[in-house]
């Protein structure tokens, strides 16, 4: 079962919107079963010497965690393309564009089942919905997605769901709704 699994998290700071700490704790538990797995952290407060790195050092965390911080959207797309799992532990942030981009690339998502926007995107598959306040649920989802056959199925479904949600037809439907709202305003 042990193959290189890159888990990616994109955050807006250690103290804003989410619970990066629980994501890291779940990754550490997962890493006990998948020693070659790596966690890559992107976004505000996630660089070397920044809040998340300092918290890990203070908590004496010794795991393969890489602190990239804020990077260009181009670099983020490259990172998403090499990821095996997108971990979204936000408690407040609505469905980020990066989540949908990850799915379009076939990267399965683990996200909060109590987040309406995220839940509606993942309700037809493409990842696992968990209680992001429970480390054991996040860890179990990581373990599920480490199973090659299951990962492939969920990866294919992620891509399919992203295409279905954001096809030209759906885009045009939204555009017409916005036009109608603009005309009636």
Image (cartoon, helix red, strand yellow):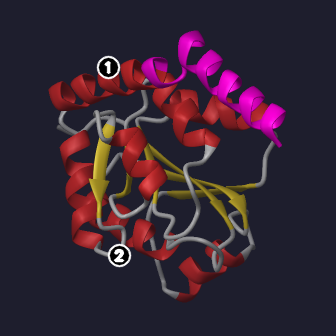
- At x 50% / y 23%, what residue is drawn? 104
Report which residue position mark 1 lands on: 156
Left/right placement of residue 161 relative to residue 20 reads left
Relative depth, front residue between 80 and 169: 169
Whether residue 34 is visible here, answered yes or no, is no
Q: Please provide percent x and percent y for residue 176.
A: 68, 22
Extreme front residue here?
Answer: 184
Residue range highlighted in magenta: 163-185
Q: Please provide percent x and percent y for residue 150.
A: 18, 31
Q: Quadrant of residue 92?
A: bottom right
Q: Can you say which quadrant of the picture contains the C terminus? A: top right
* Residue 67, above or below 83: below
Left/right placement of residue 160 relative to residue 153 reads right
Extreme top residue here?
Answer: 168
- At x 30% / y 53%, what residue is drawn? 129
- At x 17% / y 37%, what residue is drawn? 1
Q: Quadrant of residue 159?
A: top left
| Number of residues whose C-alpha sits closer than 10 Å to that of mark 1, classed few (under 14), some (14–19) or many (20 or more) | some
Extreme bottom residue here?
Answer: 58
* Residue 87, above or below 92: above
Disc 1 element: helix
Q: Please provide percent x and percent y for residue 173.
A: 59, 20
Q: Please provide percent x and percent y for residue 50.
A: 74, 73
Report which residue position mark 2 lands on: 133
């Amino acid at each position: 079962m042990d193959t290189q699994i890159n888990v990616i998290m994109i955050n807006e700071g250690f103290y804003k919107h989410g619970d990066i700490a629980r994501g890291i704790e779940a990754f550490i538990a997962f890493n006990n079963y998948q020693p070659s797995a790596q966690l890559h952290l992107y976004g505000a407060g996630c660089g070397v010497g920044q809040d998340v790195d300092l918290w890990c050092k203070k908590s004496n965390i010794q795991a393969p965690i890489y602190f990239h911080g804020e990077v260009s959207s181009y670099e983020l797309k490259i990172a998403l393309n090499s990821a095996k799992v997108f971990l979204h532990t936000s408690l407040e942030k609505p469905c980020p564009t990066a989540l949908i981009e990850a799915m379009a690339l076939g990267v399965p998502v683990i996200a909060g089942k109590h987040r309406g926007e995220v839940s509606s995107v993942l309700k037809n598959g493409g990842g696992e919905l968990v209680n992001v306040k429970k480390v054991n649920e996040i860890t179990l989802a990581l373990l599920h997605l480490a199973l090659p056959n299951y990962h492939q199925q969920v990866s294919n479904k992620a891509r399919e769901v992203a295409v279905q949600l954001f096809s030209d037809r759906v885009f045009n439907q939204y555009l017409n709704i916005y036009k109608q709202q603009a005309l009636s305003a």
